[in-house]
Image: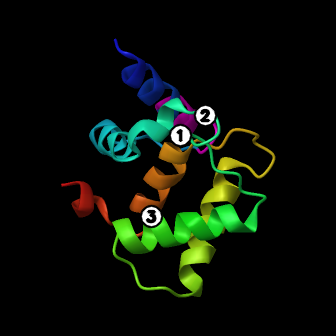
Amino acid sequence: MGKRDDLIAKYADDLKEKCGVTPDMDLLTKVTIGCGPSIYNADASTVASSQEGELETVKKNFLMKKLGLSDGPELMDAINSVVETYGRSERNKYRAVVYYMLVKHFSKEAVYG
């Protein structure tokens, strides 16, 4: 297994153990690949959920640009809901896991079709 496969396995574990979600491995793989090289960077691979600016970036660059959603309060509500599910006190919230849960939340799997 390559480094990416190891990371995908780690993300799947987080989804199962920390979020209580059984991951769709095909979708998780596509979301992880969609994150690009950021998954290999310690800082970029996680979402700093305590920083408002970071959550705005997730909203603008992922939800609006990538998933094509319109801006509205429901976007930030969804991000906060995902952060709650992951666990606010969880130090490492992996970007691929957060994005995966947002894709599922908005039923936007077709974007990765």
Asked which quadrant contains residue 8, the reply is top left
* 3 or 2: mark nearer the eye: 3
The outermost residue toward the left is 113
Magenta part of the protein: which range?
Answer: 12-19
Q: Are marks 3 and 1 in contact (CB under 8 Å)?
A: no
Q: Kindly identify the residue that appears in the image at 42 percent across and 18 percent down.
A: 3
**How far, Cα to Cα, is label 3 from label 2?**
24 Å
Asked which quadrant contains residue 17, the reply is top right
The three-letter code of the residue at mark 2 reads: Glu
Magenta region includes residue 56:
no
Q: Which residue is mark 1?
A: 15
Q: In the rendering, which numbered label is found on residue 59?
A: none
Q: Kindly identify the residue that appears in the image at 64 percent across and 65 percent down.
A: 55
- Is 8 above or below relative to 34? above
On the image, the x and y values in percent for residue 86 come to: 65, 49
Q: In the rendering, which numbered label is found on residue 62?
A: 3
**How far, Cα to Cα, is label 3 from label 1?**
19 Å
Magenta region includes residue 17:
yes
Q: Please name whichever residue, 13 or 79, is drawn nearer the observer in this view of the structure.
A: 79
**How far, Cα to Cα, is label 1 from label 2?**
6 Å
Q: Which residue is mark 2?
A: 17
The three-letter code of the residue at mark 1 reads: Leu
Q: Main secondary structure of the magenta part?
A: helix
Asked which quadrant contains residue 65, the reply is bottom left
